[in-house]
Image (tube, helix red, strand yellow):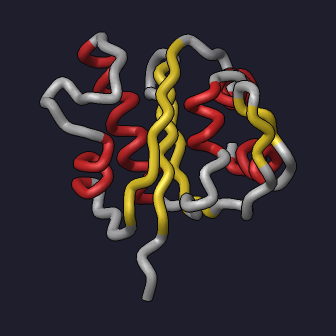
Amino acid sequence: MLSLVNAARTQATTCGSTVKDPVAAIEWNDELAKAALDHSNDMQAQNYFSHTGQDGSSFGQRVRAAGYTGSPVGENIALGYRDEEAVIQGWLESTGHCNNIMNGNANQIGIARSAEGNYWTMVLGRKKEE
């Protein structure tokens, strides 16, 4: 999935009615992927679809709980897509989700699909400056 996201980020991409200039490629982060997987699995297990966890948690809180030390930038969720290409295309066709993908402040990403079912979560972050 990382290659699909970077293919969009590194070329001009239309988000809604706005053409976004290319931004730098993004790198994979295991903590963000853990936060994404935990949220996807929780949505499926608890049968809900929301950026707010059943426990009231925000994506930023889930990212911190997963051990991420950078800054949370954004979260995309999706339900019902059959494969990676379809969910990325769906996000790119949604203005808000596309804006998250094209956010130049984000330089790390984690994406996951629920173990069973079709709940998807993408979490974007900015690596902590050293």
**Residue visible at 41% across and 39% down?**
37
| 91 is higher (above) or lower (below) than 79 | below
Residue 95 location (% of width, % of height)? 63, 27
The furthest residue to the front? 17
Residue 125 picture location, percent across and down: 47, 58
Q: Position of residue 55 (x, y in %)?
A: 13, 30
Picture quadrant where residue 87 is located? top right
Residue pushed farthest left? Answer: 55
Q: Residue at 58% x, 63% y: name it.
A: 107
Q: Is residue 123 left or right of residue 53?
A: right
> Which quadrant holds the C terminus?
bottom left
Indicate left or right for 30 with 91 as reference: left
Residue farthest toward the right in the current orientation of the protein: 11
Q: Residue furthest bottom?
A: 130
In the rendered view, tell whether residue 52 sits above or below residue 109: above
- Locate the N terminus by quadrant: top right
- Asked whether, in this view, residue 88 is left or right of residue 44, the answer is right
Q: Is residue 14 left or right of residue 105?
A: right
Q: Image quarter for residue 105?
A: bottom right
| Residue at image coords 50%, 33% | 76
Q: Residue at x 74, y 59 (%)?
A: 23
